[in-house]
């Protein structure tokens, strides 16, 4: 590929450069040296420039997935069958399933095995248009295996296909072989310092639920992460109203995820502190949750809403951000504009990357999706359809759909 490319004849370019979609009709976009340099109507190819014809195509920023658990060994299809028969997530976890079941299999896997499996999943995500992905640890639950997972994540980043944001989630569950108090000390005194020293994570996360880590325990973990230079984020108020949203505000978290059952006072605190809400509609659907996040109240309070896949083997096996977008509209009641922004610019904001990715603006990284649909509404309307024709990451074509 040439160092300079131009996307011409685009039906719509969704720039995200204003409060809406920032639509440019019948426009073009120029990329040089992996960066967007200009866009708008009237651009014409220059000598030696590679031309990509985008006739009948919506062009938009590469999708950003701000919440995934991509690195693990072993699936949990038997638990899915149990839930269909009426068992709850909590009941399955208390019976020895859930996160702990994946931990046992992940501990047994080698770093190379984990890397190969995760790379295949990452390539599938790319085929659905994801160009930046956050990946959490959390299936090791001891120092050796948490570091193993984080090193796999670093290898995925080094592969150079997409942007990768690593998150340390040692506080995902309590290992069977330890008391919770002892495990918390291990996280704070040993895991966090070595993760920070080796530069293995950008964020520190915790699964804040009363039956896992309560609000005070979560606060202690996130404050320890902050002291070590890790940015706080949190799994909040999914299974119960556990105070996770309140902790997010109190520690100045960048984001809080799930948020099915937060109190209004906690949401007001989040709004005041600028915490991004990362909603995970596929998980709610997959687990058949009764509750829904209070999207209307979030809108009223001006809380930015991002959307993530929450890909993991137990509660969301979705790798496709276009489908996350559709679930956000149909299952959570987001508008199409809110959902598209939620998987692009606001998702980037949830990772503190909005100055680099998430919109199509001069100077930003050239992460671009060329679709096979002619109008932005089709992204939500064409249920289950993969709209991705071409994926450009850092100015390079990394995926091209085979034409039938």
Image (tube, grey):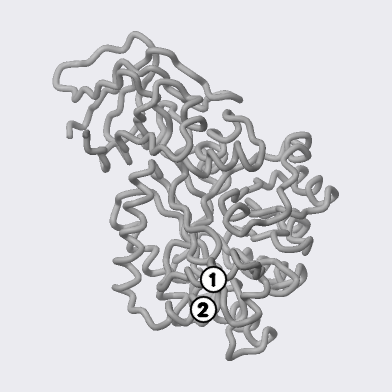
Image spot of residue 319 (x, y percent): 43, 52
Image quadrant where one finds the C terminus: top left
Query: Can you name the residue that lies furthest to the left here?
Result: 48
Q: Is residue 69 left or right of residue 56?
A: right
Distance between the Cα atoms at labels 1 and 2? 10 Å
In the image, residue 284 above or below residue 364: below
Residue 231, compared with residue 24, is above or below; it is: below
- Residue 386: quarter of image: top left
Q: Nearer the viewer, residue 197 or 134?
A: 134
Q: Left or right: 29 with respect to 45?
A: right
Percent x, y for residue 397?
25, 38
As drawn, is 243 to the left or to the right of 254? right
Tell me the SS state at disc 1.
Answer: helix
Please give the label number shown on residue 101.
2
Residue furthest to the front: 85
Q: Which badge, 1 or 2, is on the more N-terminal residue?
A: 1
Tell whether label 2 touches label 1 (CB within 8 Å): yes
Q: How many marks do you count on the picture?
A: 2
Q: Residue at x 39, y 26 (%)?
A: 373
Q: Which mark is residue 79?
A: 1
- Mark 2, other Cα within 10 Å: few <14 / some 14–19 / many ≥20: some
């Amino acid at each position: 590929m040439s160092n300079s490319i131009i996307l011409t004849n685009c039906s719509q370019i969704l720039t995200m450069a204003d409060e809406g979609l920032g639509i440019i009709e019948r426009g073009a976009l120029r990329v040089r040296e992996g960066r967007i340099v200009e866009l708008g109507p009237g651009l014409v190819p220059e000598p030696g420039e590679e031309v990509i014809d985008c006739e009948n195509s919506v062009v938009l920023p590469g999708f950003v997935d701000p919440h995934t658990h991509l690195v693990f060994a072993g699936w949990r299809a038997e638990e899915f069958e149990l839930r269909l028969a009426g068992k709850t997530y909590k009941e399955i976890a208390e019976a020895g399933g859930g996160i702990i079941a994946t931990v046992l299999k992940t501990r047994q896997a080698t770093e190379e095995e984990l890397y190969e499996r995760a790379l295949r999943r990452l390539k599938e995500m790319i085929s659905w248009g994801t160009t930046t992905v956050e990946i959490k640890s959390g299936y090791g639950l001891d120092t050796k295996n948490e570091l193993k997972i984080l090193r796999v994540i670093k290898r995925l980043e080094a592969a150079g296909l997409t942007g990768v944001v690593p998150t340390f989630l040692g506080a995902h569950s309590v290992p069977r072989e330890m008391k919770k108090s002892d495990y918390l000390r291990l996280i704070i005194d040993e895991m966090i310092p070595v993760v920070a020293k080796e530069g293995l994570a950008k964020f520190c996360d915790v699964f804040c639920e009363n039956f896992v880590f309560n609000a005070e325990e979560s606060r202690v973990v996130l404050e320890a992460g902050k002291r070590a230079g890790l940015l706080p984020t949190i799994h909040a108020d999914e299974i119960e109203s556990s105070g996770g949203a309140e902790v997010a505000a109190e520690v100045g978290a960048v984001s809080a995820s799930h948020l099915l059952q937060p109190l209004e006072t906690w949401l007001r605190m989040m709004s005041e502190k600028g915490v991004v809400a990362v909603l995970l509609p596929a998980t709610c659907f997959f687990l058949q949750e009764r509750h829904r996040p209070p999207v209307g109240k979030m809108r009223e309070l001006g809380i930015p809403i991002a959307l993530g896949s929450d890909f993991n083997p137990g509660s969301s096996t979705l790798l496709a951000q276009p489908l996350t977008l559709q679930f956000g509209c149909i299952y959570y009641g987001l508008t199409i504009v809110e959902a598209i922004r939620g998987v692009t610019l606001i998702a980037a904001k949830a990772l503190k990357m909005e100055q680099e990715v998430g919109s199509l603006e001069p100077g930003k990284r050239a992460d671009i999706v060329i679709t096979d649909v002619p109008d932005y509404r089709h992204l939500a309307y064409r249920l289950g359809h993969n709209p991705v024709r071409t994926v450009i990451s850092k100015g390079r074509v990394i995926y091209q759909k085979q034409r039938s």
